[in-house]
Amino acid sequence: MARPEFLTIEETANTLGVSTRHARRLADSGAVTRVARGLIDRPSVDRYRQSQRQGRTRAWAEHTAWGAVALLAGQTPDWLGTTQASRLRQNLRKIAASKGIGDLLTRMRDRAQAHTYVAHRAALPRLREVVATANTRVLGLTDATNETFDGYLDANELDGLVRTLGLRADPARRGLSRCA
């Protein structure tokens, strides 16, 4: 039986192991996506739950998380020192070898807030120019199609990009992430 696309506040609370009051606060803050009164988008709950896996693994500092995004995008993180960049590459290789995408998400937790958008196909080339996209093949995952992609953007630039390119919110698909 297929899982429903939406959860009630109570189902969201049970899935996350929190109170219904806390689930409502998560929806109000945008940590999970509310699609209608009392309905939460299941993929946003799954992403939130994955991002909260903490265990004993420490989250990366902001500059290190951005360095990982840059390396996965095939760019050089000039702001990292030689030793720090080398350690980060080594960590990314370990994550790729173990296909531990969960470990990558754990390391980058609290660094990004997911937002999903639909764009006209004419806007996609411009988006690809300004958004940092990761080479997911490095982690043993498939790349996005020509019509979809995941990317990272500084939080201060998101609103302007949404207005400029006429992006429309779409909680049913994965898309841009807003980095904090």
Image: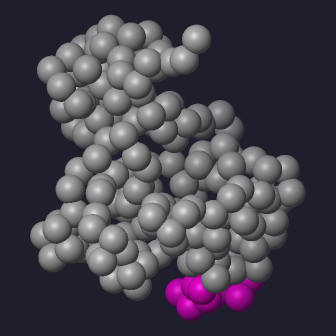
Q: Is residue 64 visible?
A: no
Q: Is residue 176 left or right of residue 36?
A: right
Instruction: Name the residue: 18% across, 25% down.
Output: 36
User: Residue 138's quadrant in the figure?
Assistant: bottom right
Q: Is residue 114 left or right of residue 139?
A: left
Position of residue 160 relative to residue 114, above or below, is below
Instruction: Name the residue: 36% across, 74% down.
Output: 124
> In the rendered structure, which segment of residues is drawn in magenta?
75-83
User: Residue 35's quadrant in the figure?
Assistant: top left
> Is residue 80 found inside the magenta-colored segment of the image?
yes
**Residue 61 image point, x, y percent:** 52, 63
> Is residue 100 found inside the magenta-colored segment of the image?
no
Instruction: Name the residue: 34% across, 52% down.
Output: 116
Q: Is residue 36 left or right of residue 86?
A: left
Q: Is residue 101 left or right of residue 31?
A: right
The secondary structure that dominates the magenta segment is loop
* Image colouring: one colour
